[in-house]
Image (cartoon, grey):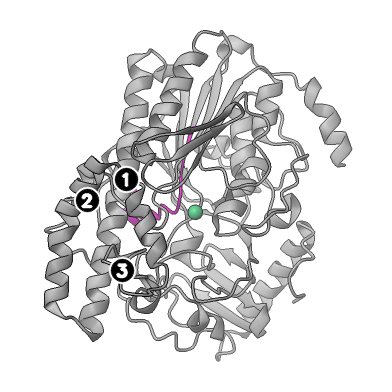
């Protein structure tokens, strides 16, 4: 099968004339949860530029990932395949670089292609005429290209944005359309805001999720075993930007992040965080009050990083408008996965629970007739490659697991659109600085979710209509037998359909 597909690549024939093909700008955030997107009803913030994109385009209300972690999500988006099939099952190696991807297919059909920002897939990017991988933290990233490395001194979100606009500008010299994957590193840990964002939210007390003090009762032992609690697993210097104590875990790494700033950036940082840290030291908080303080610091910093993402999108769209490109450029905004913003007491992702499994997805096709469409169907990041291919007028390889969303975006619901989605997280890690989330797979329908945390041989079942916060595990409870049996059968069917023999059998 694989050889057949590869042989096909040089013979890809666009179905539309080159001049008619739209440009594609795919803006991909890192760990940007739906709950921090205004258009998704965020109780925390507004994201004016992302919200405008949704108002003018299509918002997918039920958008999910197949494996909620950075590297695997990117590999899935590129190949249209679940992790076991593209090889990138965890953040380690394994990516099957020989697979067809939307980038390779667009490139072969004459598109000018680029990838700028976070990569995290493994082998050097293929299918891109130009690539620049941002390495480092929120400040002073090193940009690695095929030509070499360049150290920069800016704020990473802005460095990635500027490099992307520079490339788009250079691509305009040729007649062929362009497709760029703008791959942000925000709003990933350690949530360090840029200088102009330091004071945002400083005077606000942001609302807490109702499960901030979750005790994990009734859930699989895997939930309580996860090391991503705001109360316990955020590190002082590294995550919370407090002065490191002697011998503190990740204290040196926290310091290194501060040292990546220029002198001017560092003094702006100290001016903002110094007095706040002094007030914190003076307050001597303990117990729940300390957890609440950590939540506020975490979430404020997270939102400040989100604000930079939003501004970046605004800048990109202004550029498109100013250069006469807005009418023929499809803009997609999504994130590699969601993130826990205090739900279940957590930060981070990995779990199949909603805050992590959901991811924002907004598509604006300026050629579309309707605006402000909201799509309810269950879509997943396996659909991204087929969608980009269809927008580029290319055939979608039958080997891809996903399906193009273009028809849903035009409100033409296919009669056979999926009614369930498959999920499999399978990174295994251990140690104080890792998150130790147990591997698990499961199935989600519109109403229910069944999770098999197989290392613990434990199951969880949720009725998402009655219990959207997933606090009440119904597995094994009275009256849940029939729906459990139905979902187990569906899970089995999906594992067979996608030929996922990895993880413990049901
Ligand atoms: Ca991520």
In magenta segment, residue 34:
yes
Label 2: which secondary element: helix
Where does label 3 land, which residue? 244
Q: Position of residue 354 (x, y in %)?
A: 47, 65
Name the image quarter holding the N terminus.
Answer: top right
**Local SS, label 1:** loop
Q: Mark 2–mark 1 contact, CB under 8 Å?
A: yes
Residue 269, numbered label: 2
Q: Residue furthest front?
A: 246
Residue 400 in the image: above or below residue 173: below
Query: Residue placed at 38% from the left, 75% from the top?
Result: 247
Q: Residue furthest bottom?
A: 478
- Residue 268 on image: x %, y %: 19, 46
Above or below: residue 435 compared with residue 201: below
Q: Which residues are magenta?
A: 26-42
Q: Which residue is mark 1?
A: 261
Q: Are marks 3 and 1 in contact (CB under 8 Å)?
A: no
Relative to 226, is 55 on the left or the right? left
- Circles 3 and 2, Cβ within 8 Å, touching? The answer is no
Residue 40 in view (yes/no) = no
Q: CA distance from mark 3 to mark 2?
A: 16 Å
Q: Is residue 268 left or right of residue 60?
A: left
- The residue mark sitting in front, 3 or 2, is 3
Name which of mark 2 and mark 1 comes first in the sequence. Answer: 1
In the rendered view of the protein, which quadrant contains the C terminus?
A: bottom right
> Considering the numbered disc 3 on the image, is that residue within a helix, a strand or a loop?
loop
């Amino acid at each position: 099968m694989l050889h057949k597909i590869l042989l096909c690549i040089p013979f890809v024939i666009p179905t539309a004339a080159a001049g008619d093909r739209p440009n594609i700008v795919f803006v991909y955030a890192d760990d940007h949860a739906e709950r921090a997107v205004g258009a998704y009803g965020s109780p925390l913030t507004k994201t004016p530029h992302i919200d405008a994109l949704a108002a003018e385009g299509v918002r997918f209300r039920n958008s999910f990932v197949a494996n909620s972690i950075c590297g695997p999500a990117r590999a899935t988006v590129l190949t249209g395949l679940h992790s076991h099939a593209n090889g990138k099952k965890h953040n380690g190696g394994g990516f099957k670089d020989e697979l067809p991807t939307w980038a390779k297919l667009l490139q072969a059909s004459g598109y000018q292609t680029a990838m700028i920002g976070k990569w995290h897939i493994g082998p050097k990017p293929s299918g891109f005429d130009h690539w620049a991988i941002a390495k480092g933290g929120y400040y002073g990233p090193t940009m690695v290209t095929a030509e070499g490395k360049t150290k920069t001194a800016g704020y990473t979100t802005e460095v990635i944005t500027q490099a992307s606009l520079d490339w788009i500008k250079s691509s305009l010299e040729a007649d062929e359309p362009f497709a760029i994957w703008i791959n942000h590193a925000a709003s990933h840990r350690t949530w360090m805001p840029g200088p102009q964002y330091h004071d945002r939210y400083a005077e606000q007390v942001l609302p807490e999720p109702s499960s901030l003090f979750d005790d994990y009762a009734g859930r699989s032992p895997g939930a309580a075993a996860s090391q991503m609690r705001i109360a316990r697993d955020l590190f002082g210097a590294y995550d919370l930007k407090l002065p490191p104590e002697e011998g503190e875990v990740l204290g040196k790494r926290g310091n290194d992040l501060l040292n990546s700033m220029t002198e001017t950036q560092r003094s702006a940082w100290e001016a903002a965080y110094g007095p706040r840290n002094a007030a914190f030291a003076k307050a001597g908080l303990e117990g729940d009050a300390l957890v609440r303080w950590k939540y506020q610091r975490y979430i404020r910093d997270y939102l400040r990083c989100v604000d930079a993402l939003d501004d970046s999108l605004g800048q990109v769209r202004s550029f498109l408008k100013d250069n006469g490109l807005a009418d023929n450029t499809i803009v997609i905004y999504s994130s590699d996965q969601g993130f826990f913003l205090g739900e279940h007491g957590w930060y981070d992702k990995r779990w199949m629970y909603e805050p992590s499994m959901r991811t924002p997805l907004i598509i604006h096709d300026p050629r579309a007739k309707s605006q402000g469409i909201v799509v309810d169907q269950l879509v997943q990041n396996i659909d991204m490659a087929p969608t980009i291919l269809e927008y580029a007028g290319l055939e979608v390889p039958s080997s891809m697991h996903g399906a193009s969303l273009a028809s849903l975006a035009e409100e033409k619901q296919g009669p056979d659109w999926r009614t369930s989605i498959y999920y499999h997280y399978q990174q295994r890690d251990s140690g104080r600085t890792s998150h130790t989330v147990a591997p698990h797979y499961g199935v989600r329908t519109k109403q229910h979710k069944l999770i098999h945390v197989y290392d613990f041989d434990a199951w969880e079942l949720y009725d998402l209509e009655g219990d959207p916060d997933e606090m009440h595990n119904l597995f094994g409870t009275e009256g849940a037998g029939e729906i459990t049996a139905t979902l187990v059968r569906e899970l089995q069917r999906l594992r067979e359909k996608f030929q996922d023999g990895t993880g413990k059998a049901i």
